[in-house]
Amino acid sequence: MWNIIFLLWYLLVSFILTFALSPFYIRFLHKYKLGKQIREDALVWKATEFAKLHQHKLWTPAIWWWIILFMIFLLVLSSIIIKYYWVYIENIFWMEIKFSLFNRNETYLPLFTLFTVGILWLADDFINIKWIWWAKWISAKFKMIWLILFASAWAYWFYFKLGYTSFNLPFYWDINVWYFYIPIFIFIIISMANAVNITDWLDGLVWWLLLFNYTIYAIITYYQSLFILSAICMIIVWALIAFLWFNIKPAQFYMWDVWALALWANLWIMAMMTNTLIVLIIISWIYIIEILSSLIQVTSKKLRNWKKIFKIAPFHHHLEACGWKEETIVMRFWLIGMVLSSIWLIVSFLLK
């Protein structure tokens, strides 16, 4: 019973805080013109068609992630303080405080991931908004190096410190990959973080998908008795629900790159902690299709004298260029995300 109360308390506070602060933050972003620029540069040549499709989003307020960052920090800090003084609280309210959100076994790695991955994209988003140093954003090469260093550090930690050498695949049990664990770990976290990032740019699309993903991992962690980690997942889920109230078309502001990458990197860490790689693969098919479409497009341009497979990559922009309405694409991708989540529930039931 206490575990349920613990989760309900944090998800309720998360939603109320995020929803209440958002209108004030929107006005703050408008006042200081912290809005998004439309990028015309792509990996290969220019993204002029993309710029035309999304020109109406120019200067829409961005960097909403400050609210969720502040809210997570506030809840973690308050939980530490409440836990420290739980004896006095118990005497006053006859209620024992059993948990803090800052827990070595469950939340050190996820919280550190959220803040670490976000540092570079914090700078990238701010440079893009203000065009600091005569630049529009940090170069893709520099960001890739940063991601590789981050992924390498975590791969080292899981392999040498925690003793992970295998990936769990149902029906095949654990597949031991020995030293190949490190390069596989690095490849997956880099490729999928970028896949989630490029799935953005349609109002509400990637954030609903991440909401489904985090709901699944709230269930997984709760089922594995990782109640504190489950609380972190629910805090993020309900903060995203509050955010999406303002992000559904026409979006009043955007979260932007920093949290798309940070939130998925955090999902990968939780997948490793809970040994649920197959779940992450099942619920990530939309991201996989998106990044494959971009890779196919880039390869085609380079090898076939600039000839394209898609009108625009990634795939959701191709559908947009073909005449699909933005909200149609978003809703159908949401439905696919719900189906993938349902498939996981079926698979997990069969494996019991």
Image: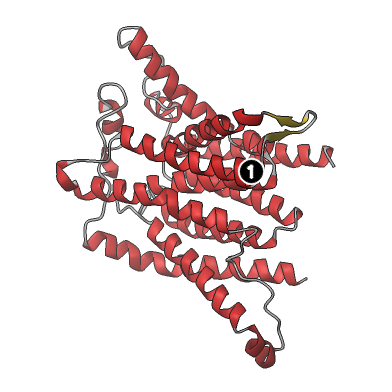
Q: Position of residue 275 (x, y in %)?
A: 69, 42
Q: Position of residue 108 (x, y in %)?
A: 56, 58
What residue is pinned by disc 1? Answer: 272
What residue is drawn where x is 49% and y is 40%?
A: 151
Going by the numbered disc 1, the residue's amino acid type is: Met
Q: Position of residue 305 (x, y in %)?
A: 30, 7
**From the viewer's perspective, is residue 301 above or below residue 135?**
above
What residue is drawn where x is 16% and y is 45%?
A: 133
- Closer-to-camera residue (40/272): 272
Quarter of the image containing the C terminus? top right
The answer to whether any part of residue 304 appears in the image is yes
Quarter of the image containing the N terminus? bottom right
- Closer-to-camera residue (163/28): 163
The answer to whether any part of residue 212 appears in the image is no
Q: Position of residue 293 (x, y in %)?
A: 46, 22
Q: Going by the picture, which residue comes out furthest to the front?
A: 160
Left or right of residue 57: residue 288: right
